[in-house]
Image (spheres, grey):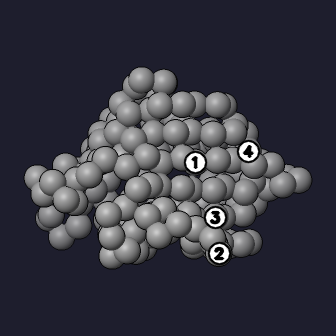
Amino acid sequence: MTLMSSINPAGTPADVLVLRRLIDATPDLVFAVWSDPRHVAEWWRPDGYTTPVFEMDFRVGGAFRYCIRKAGRDSWARGVYREIVPKSRIVLTFQWQSGDAAHDAETLVTVSFEAQDERTLLTFRQEPFSSTASRHSHGVGWNQVLASFESFVNKQRDSS
């Protein structure tokens, strides 16, 4: 169950996407689920998609590449980890590989993990977007990915 979720709080610039979720798990667990390739392949997808490929070299300068699939259609993306502060922050580039230059513009994603007692406030920030339509589309997709992430975290928490 989501304790709190928000999209683009007041004051968010038009070319920036900000999603926040208060997750009922410690930053240790939340960071572990975000940083372990075995876990990431299980949750990194929007509703209705599978993740048949997820390659991840989780270190500064390391890269990731993945494929999400829906109804036989594959969508590929990639990125590079720019900064990793364990249990606190991950900064990475993100780029679709569709062949459409406008759609495939590289963005910067910052994921922050802030302890709130035994919970974690996860803040996801992606920028810049060339249009509000692109920001909205990414917001819908990432919100679904974060819901999948939260569900996976809850399963991990409950099984330990």
Secondary structure under the numbered disc 2 in the rendered image = loop
Instruction: Look at discs 2 and 3 and give the one toward the viewer.
Output: 2
Of circles 3 and 4, the one toward us is: 3
Q: Residues within 10 Å of mark 4 (few under 14, many from 20)?
A: many
Mark 1 or 2: in front is 2
Q: Which residue is mark 4?
A: 27
* SS at badge 3: strand
In the image, what residue occupies the spot 58% across and 68% down?
Answer: 12
Residue for point 54% across, 47% down: 110
Q: Secondary structure at mark 1?
A: strand
How far across and down, in percent of the image, does residue 92 sit? 45, 39
Q: Can you give x and y, in whole percent of width and height, for residue 144 in the image?
A: 46, 69
Position of 136 relative to 130 (above/below): below
Q: Secondary structure at mark 4?
A: helix
Mark closest to the chain's N terminus, 4 or 1: 4
For marks 1 and 3 on the same chain, the one whose residue lies earlier in the sequence: 3
36 is higher (above) or lower (below) than 103: above
Which label sits on residue 10? 2
Quick check: 103 above or below 96? below
